[in-house]
Amino acid sequence: MLISPRRGCLVQARRHLALTCPSAAKIAPPRRPREKVEIPGLEVITYGERMHYVPGLAKPVYPPWEKDYKDPGYYKSPPAQEMALYKQKPCYVFNQRTSMLEAVRQAAWLTKTQVNSGLPPHLLTLAESLESRVEDQSERVQNAIKHARFWDTTESRPNKEKYSKTLLLNLLHLCATLQSSSSTQRRRILAENYSLAATWRRGEDLFQVRGQNGLLQCSMDALPQVCGEKDISATVDHVLETFYPVSPTIDLQKVNVYKEMNCTGFRYDYLYPHAHTLYFLESTDPQWKLKPDQFRAKMFMFAFGNALARAHKLYGTEPRSLLQRPITVQAVGSNGRIFQFLVFQLNTTDLDQDDGIKNQMWLDADVELYDFAKVRPLIKKKQVKVPAGLSGYKAEAFRKFLALYLHGAV
């Protein structure tokens, strides 16, 4: 309400609304470009010679300016057909952001692998025997969890990406201190941000695994093979699962510019040439976040890629129906609470046909380390449903984590 200066009375303020909300929110349609009319035999008069805009004259068209030096900021790649690495036959690439539709089943077909549920029996026996030898193991693991979830942040709710990585590093440090007397532990090192490339043929198609993947624990000594010759020979009778009518190459990047290469990511004289265990963390970016099954397929493919690149370096790129010594690579995935454990054994590099000896993989999925880690209690209807702090700790997950870490050292 306003007071009129002349009448001295209250006057209601007027509202001036020119447009309604729906019409005001509309975006003006883009302008249509004017059609250029070219008349043969007629010269177009432009304002190029006058060096300024002149109404009524046409806009000059200049040839593209080519610099006499290479400027990365304005580099334009030539067409793919003119590149030196262009090939008519395409290559299907799996990288760290690939989300395969059929996940583990598709990865098993691509790598000619027999999938087994659960970890190998001797690794489970190793995990149970280690628990009785270590004092205060549960308490130290719970302190590592509390450090990652509560003590390493000042925020009310810690960032998932931060506490997942902190927890993984805490568990690795704890595993190293539990068995620090072993000389084998000193023959290992952690590597990060290394690039992998492995190429193989499956049927009539060419496949490649490449890119950066997780945290790698390298070793001077190779992991022992999980299965003996008898179990390896029994894989001949295994029939690979198909997912017809879905194509095995679905969701893989199809490229025509590529180079057939096999590289472990390290120099030939690297002191720790053997891949021991790969550690993966789930991405928190919603654009590239993978579902649990696709995340396990990523672990599967990169474990296979590391083993295949090592096999090609040892035995050459020619396909071999049975390796003289199978190559074993492990993988561990985590989102800060749930862990995935994987053991892969490369028995053959002859991946062209479905028959013959198969590779082997053991997968223990969705193993929970704890139930809740709350900064504040969860209260519903005046009842405490979940108390503050760490609750529901499960020692089985760390036993398996420790067993994979000490595999080959005990």
Image: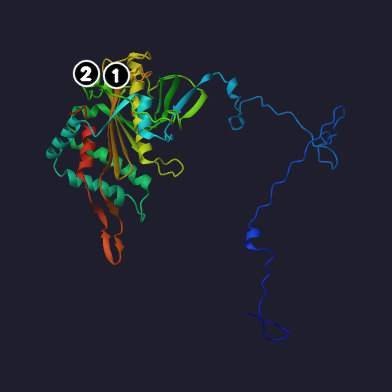
In the drawing, does residue 193 fall left or right of residue 322? right
Q: Residue furthest bottom?
A: 8
Q: Please name the residue that numbered disc 2 is placed on.
A: 229
In terms of depth relative to the viewer, which is nearer, 181 or 29? Answer: 29
Q: Residue furthest right?
A: 42
Q: Nearer the viewer, residue 185 or 197?
A: 197
Q: Secondary structure at mark 1?
A: loop
Residue 276, image quadrant = top left
In the rendered image, is residue 214 in sight?
no
**Comparing labels 2 and 1, the label whose residue is closer to the camera:** 1
Residue type at numbered disc 2:
Glu
Instruction: Name the side, left or right, on which 275 lies relative to 206.
Output: left
Q: Residue at x 78, y 38 (%)?
A: 35
Quadrant of the image containing the N terminus: bottom right
Separation (CA) of disc 2 from disc 1? 11 Å
Q: State the mark number for residue 357.
A: 1
Q: Please tell me which residue is depicted at 59% across the width and 33% down the height of the picture.
A: 73
Observer-nearest of 22 and 343: 22
Residue 71 picture location, percent across and down:
61, 29
> Can you see residue 181?
yes
Q: Identify which residue, 151 or 195, lies in the foreground.
A: 195
Query: Does 305 appear above or below 291?
Result: above
The quarter of the image holding the C terminus is top left
Q: Which mark is residue 28?
A: none
Residue at the spot 26% in from the left edge and 47% down from the top edge: 145
Amino acid identity at mark 1: Ile
First of labels 2, 1 by sequence position: 2
In the rendered image, residue 268, in percent from the top left (x then y), is placed at 36, 18
